[in-house]
Amino acid sequence: MTHAVSAPLAASRSGALTGRLRVPGDKSISHRALMLGALATGVTRIRGLLEAEDVINTARAVSALGAPARRVGDLWEVLGRGTGGLRQPEAPLDFGNSGTGTRLMMGVIAPHDMTVTMTGDASLSKRPMRRVLAPLKEMGLEVEGDADRLPLTVRGSSRLVPIAYTLPVPSAQLKSAILLAGLGTAGETTVVEREATRDHTERMLRHFGAKVESVAEDGVTRITIRGEAELEGREVTVPGDPSSAAFLVAAALIVPGSDVTIEGVLVNPTRTGFYTTLLEMGGDVTFLNAREEGGEPIADIRARFSTLQGVTVPAARAPSMIDEYPILAVVAAFARGATRMEGLGELKVKESDRLAATAAGLAANGVKAEVDGDTLTVHGAGRVPGGGLVATHLDHRMAMSFLVMGLAAEQPVTVDDTAMIATSFPEFRALMDGIGARFEEGDL
Ligand code: S3P
């Protein structure tokens, strides 16, 4: 998918941000709902699917694999083909900017007798795929030319062998790819996790009727799926994305006088490390009306302007807030004292090298910060000079994080490109405008 031409935007110091709103559906859950819907028999109906480029690319991919996904009124419907029932697509599958779509789909494709070429944009084509391909190859997937980057061509097989695999990196994408391959493989496939990563795949597989066991023992979790199980089409409700809500919550905390409530946000503990950290920093964040929706915990999140202190964020928390470090770094710049974020190695292989890009964005806006190995330390001074131009490197979260910075900085903050925001949060601009954020289209 090609993106709109680069569109710079400046964010300026705003008055109090106020309002009650919802954010769009969770990206991780949306990808999984489409994929499991395609692998189930019968119709899956999805309420609240995230209609952003990354997820739309997954919808196109499952459709091209013979399981049509389309919007019907308020819902999305997927007509499933059953476990092992997908068919050879006629053209390469284009995943745009989405690592999740690509990596999970490798697991979906693996147990099928078909050859599929996968492509993506310039950012995705730089990201490592070997971490996923290595275990899938052990199971029997073939990869043309032993490639590690997109574009690449994989050949699946209906006779994969089950494996037991210890994740070398804490990656839910990797875990999910193996479990999805295991779903179509006779026997039991086991993934061993040393650090808990988001568990939406396990939860949703169970929701669709698969047998998935998670056993925590001796400091690791062993997740086992019984293969060649039949899934049945289900109703899925997608809660609000906590990674999108993070930008609104952050903005409310740093803009004086703000008071913002976001309704129906996913608060699965494998996703809430950012919120835990904000509370430790002294952030006025409250969780209201906690309830369950579609097998996932949700709540309304209220955030009010706060005086914040720097904290140390331990490496063990990284998987539960892996996408939130750029926005946490922005919040930390407005706190007093140092915020030390440890164990950020995985940030280097996201949509951009987020460790380097975040440090550069902070520096461009007069914030003292340093990177030491996998640790980022931001020296908060309670104020941010701003005035900088931030390079977003085809990365939606870089763009949104630094726009939020501009809402409370002394001088406007400009990001070089906002087109990529559509990959995860197309409503960002309108929702932020609605609570009082000041943005201005600019020339570079
Ligand atoms: C995701 C897992 C994370 C995260 C990504 C979505 C998922 O990646 O960064 O945005 O849906 O499984 P890793 O699991 O590779 O860290």
Image (tube, helix red, strand yellow):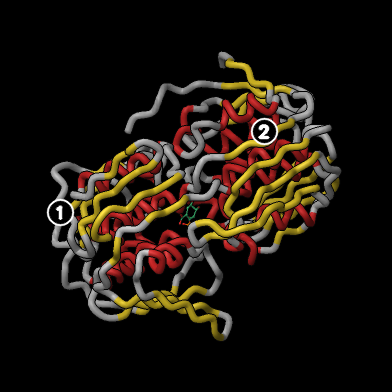
Q: Residues within 10 Å of mark 1 (few under 14, many from 20)?
A: some
Q: Which residue is mark 1?
A: 87
Amino acid carrying label 1: it is Arg
Q: Position of residue 41 (x, y in %)?
A: 24, 60
Closer to the camera, 22 or 222? 22
Q: Earlier in the sequence, mark 1 or mark 2?
A: 1
Residue occupying the point 43% across, 67% down: 202
Q: Is residue 133 above or below residue 416?
A: below
Which residue is at a point 57% across and 37% down the rendered structure image? 398
How many marks are shown on the rendered structure? 2
Residue 354 % position (x, y): 56, 45
Give the side of residue 240 with respect to residue 34, left or right: right
Query: As drawn, which residue projects farthest toward the bottom?
Result: 218
Mark nearer the viewer, 1 or 2 = 1
The quadrant the C terminus occupies is top right
Image side of residue 207 versus residue 435, left or right = left
Quarter where residue 252 is shown: top right
Q: Amino acid at mark 2?
A: Val
The label on residue 404 is 2
Estimate the x, y position of residue 246 in percent, counting from the top left: 64, 44
Query: What residue is shown at x 73% (from left), y 28% (from top)?
Result: 386
Can you see residue 165? Answer: no
Looking at this rendering, what residue extends furthest in the top direction? 443
